[in-house]
Amino acid sequence: MLLRMYTRFLSDQDMKYQIEEISQGEEAGIKSASIRVDAYRAYATLESERGVHRLVRISPFDSNKRRHTSFAGVDVVPLIEHNEDILIQDDEIRIDVYRSSGAGGQHVNTTDSAVRITHLESGIVVACQAERSQLQNKTRALELLKTKLILKQKEEELLKINDIRGDKHEAGWGRQIRSYVLQPYQQVKDSRSNTEVGNVDSVLDGDISLFIKDYLKWRRQGIND
C-alpha cells in the first residue's frame, strides 16, 4: 500500500522516479522496496515520511476476516555525490546476485542481474535491480551504500554531540509517525503534527501533501521552541 501511495504521489507531483528494487514477501505482499527520486527538493519534500507507519485493516489474506495491525518502516536517504572519501574494501562487503523481479518486460527474469550488497560491519543492506546489467546494478548499489555509510557516520557524530549537550532528539527508526486505520473506523493520523484525515482511500491513492506541509510546520515550530 505504501509503495502504491508514494508512486502515485510522485506521479501527481511530476517528480521523476524509478523503482530500484522490490523483494516479494515469503507468503504475500512486498517485503521491501527501494525508489530513487530525481527531482528538485526531493529530499526536503519526502523527509517527512521517514519512520514507522502503522496500518489497521481487515486482512485480505485472513479467511476469518479479522482485523490486523501491521507496520512498515520507511527510510529517506539523500544521494550524496562525490563520496570518493569513503573507501569500501572487498572483504568489508558481501555481494549477492539474484534474478530480477518486478513489473514484467522482456529483460525481467531472464538473467541474474540484480545485486544486493551487505556491509558486514554495520549490517547495512542495499540492492538494485533497475539496470539491465549486473555491473550497472552493482555500481548503483555501491553509490547508495557509500551514502548510507556517510549518513550513519554523521548521525553517530550528532548523537555524541547531543549526548554531551544533553539535548533531546527525535528518534527515527522505531517511532510510529502515522497511522492508517481502515477498520473499525476510517482515519489517517500523523502522530507528530496531529493532522487527521477521514478519507483514507484518498491518502492511500497518493494525496499526502497535507501531511508533508503540516510536518514542516511542526518541525519549524520545534526548532523555534
Image (spheres, grey):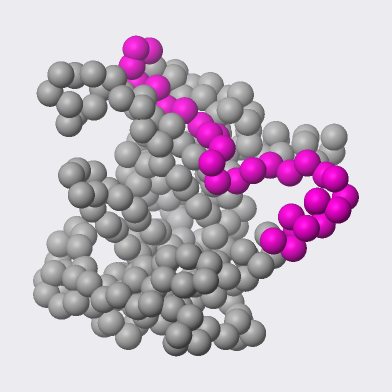
Residue 86 shows in this picture: yes
Q: Is residue 42 visible?
A: no
Pick the quarter of the image with the N terminus.
top left
From the viewer's perspective, tell me whether residue 25 is left or right of residue 217.
Answer: left
Q: Residue furthest right?
A: 165
Marker count (numbered) = 0
Q: Which portion, as a residue range, is magenta?
A: 156-185
Q: Quadrant of residue 139?
A: bottom left
**Towards the viewer: 195 or 100:** 100
- Name the residue located 51 percent from the left edge and 61 percent from the top edge: 39
Q: Which x, y percent locates residue 18? A: 36, 63
- What residue occupies the far top of the structure in this picture? 184
The quadrant of the image that shows the C terminus is: top right
Residue 109 appears in which quarter of the rendering? Answer: bottom left
Q: Give yes or no for residue 131 being in the magenta stretch.
A: no
Q: Is residue 92 above or below residue 32?
A: below
Q: Nearer the viewer, residue 183 or 35?
A: 183
- Of residues 192 and 199, which is closer to you in this image? 192
Query: Which residue is at 37% across, 42% downward?
Result: 2
Q: Is residue 30 left or right of residue 208?
A: left
Give me the residue at 27% from left, 48% from top: 30
Magenta highlight on residue 171: yes
Q: Give the vertical position of 30 relative to 1 (above or below).
A: below
Q: Position of residue 151 (x, y in %)?
A: 62, 65
128 sits left or right of 125 in the view: left
Q: Residue at 34% across / 12% down in the picture?
A: 184
Q: Quadrant of residue 149?
A: bottom right
* Residue 119, above or below 67: below
Q: Position of residue 200 (x, y in %)?
A: 39, 25
